[in-house]
Image: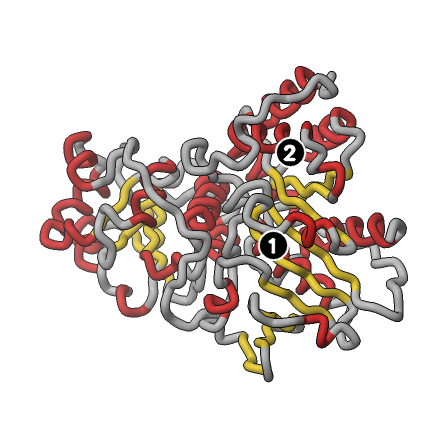
Amino acid sequence: MGMVQVLHYYCKRRRAELLNDITFKKGISCQIQTDFLDISDIVKELTNKNHIDCVAIDEDLFGIGDIEDIISKLEVLKFVTDETKILIIALDRMRNDEMIQGIQKSGVVDYIITKEMIDDFDDVISKFFDGTITENEKILYTPSNNEDYDVDDISEESGVQSEIYSSDIEDNSTSEEDYQGEYSETEYNDNTENVAEQKTIISNSQSNIFSRMKESFQQNKVSEDVSSIAEVPEDRMITIGICGLQSHIGVTHHALAMAQALSEQYKYVCYKECNTHDIYNVLQNSSLKKTMPGYIRIMNVDIFNKNADVEEYSDKYKFCIMDFGTINECTQSEFFETDIPIIIAGIKDWEFNNFMGAYSQGILDKANVVINFFPKKEQSDLQNAFSDLKIFFADYAPEVFEPIPNISMYNQIINTSLSEV
């Protein structure tokens, strides 16, 4: 690990002076940034800047996202900054904290400084900047890569947020041992004649998952024409059900993002929590929230908790987006009874087992299937391999209520489905 000469430190104002003395003594050019709300903002700011030796991120910028959400953003940051080292400073968390363990286990950052290291902070960070941290010190101060960690669906961080980022993860960072879904052990039936071809296509796309993410991120910067939604029925509310084949794969993110995308085209759109993840309570912390009788409103979306009966308001809304969580925790009959059912799926090794299991059981052909971060040059191959499925591809869009990269995809799903309703 080489010496650090150019450093960007992202933190809240309470920690703005933390690195002043050590960087001054070492002659390190340190740019302190206190106006960023989330790691996603750092990604935007540092894209195409390759002269930075190290990015230090304080835990305050973790926001309200869960573990996999944070890892997702760090993975994108790692690749848009190329060879830049990533240092996490988490002085309010112990090294056995599940967030810290999850980040360490992912291998996406170079070093994590935790609460146990406060007394030795100057010495440890000095060695990190000098590139002299030893393997023994890494073992002493960071969790083992073999340690397991539990993941909650939503991390209810305290504090008011003025922006909202992915709370369920637009998937790119789940791990095999943490997410074995309902279909992971399913044997593929004899009717799946092209399994070998399908596996080859999936395997090729898994070969460099970070490159897929970087490609997706760069593609999002290119504006494209967005197809409008076809005429919707005037006499009733259209229900859109969203669920995933496993947890932490982007369900809540897509549900809220799709609701926001629709609300920009139609004034009356609502989101209904149909799971036990309590995202409604998490969203109460947002400064964007307006409290209404029986629900909250963020941007143009009316958000109802799991106890609400949106049928009472069916004459008010054009669309109701229903977040069912995962396929094995929801009532499948209710999910498939929605006008437009959407399943969020993944294509990494362990996710592919779930994908193929659900496919062989006829689950996927009853819904629209959305896959995250799949390279454009391989999308037609996947669609041809699963020609009996309605497959759509989502791009990287970390801000839940700024869904611009995926508006066209959402509209395409709705147009395709409305023609069949």
> In the visual, does 43 lie left or right of 411?
left
Q: Earlier in the sequence, mark 1 or mark 2?
A: 1
Residue 25 vs 197, above or below: the answer is below
Residue at 74% x, 49% y: name it: 409
Residues at marks 1 and 2 touching, judged by CB atoms closer than 8 Å: no
> Which residue corresponds to the image point at 20% horizontal and 55% vertical from the top-left?
24
Q: Position of residue 81 (x, y in %)?
A: 46, 42
Locate residue 281 relative to residue 219 in the image: left or right.
left
Is residue 367 at least partly visible in the picture?
yes
Residue 87, relative to residue 282: is it above or below?
Answer: above
Report helix, strand or loop for mark 1: strand
Quadrant where the N terminus is found in the figure? top left
Residue 256, x across and y down, in percent: 61, 61
Residue placed at 68% from the left, 19% from the top? 195
Percent coordinates x, y for residue 95 in the rendering: 23, 47
- The disc label shown at residue 221, or none: none
Find disc 2 in the rendering and name its residue: 358
Residue 58 image point, x, y percent: 32, 56
Q: Which of 315 and 288 is in front in this view?
A: 315
Q: Residue at x 61, y 27 (%)?
A: 205
Amino acid carrying mark 1 in the image: Phe
**Res 178 quadrant in image:** top left
Gap between marks 1 and 2 measured at Cα: 17 Å
Tell me the kind of residue under disc 2: Ala
Q: Nearer the viewer, residue 249 or 58?
A: 249
Q: Which residue matches tag 1?
A: 324
Q: Which of 180 and 134 is in front in this view?
A: 180
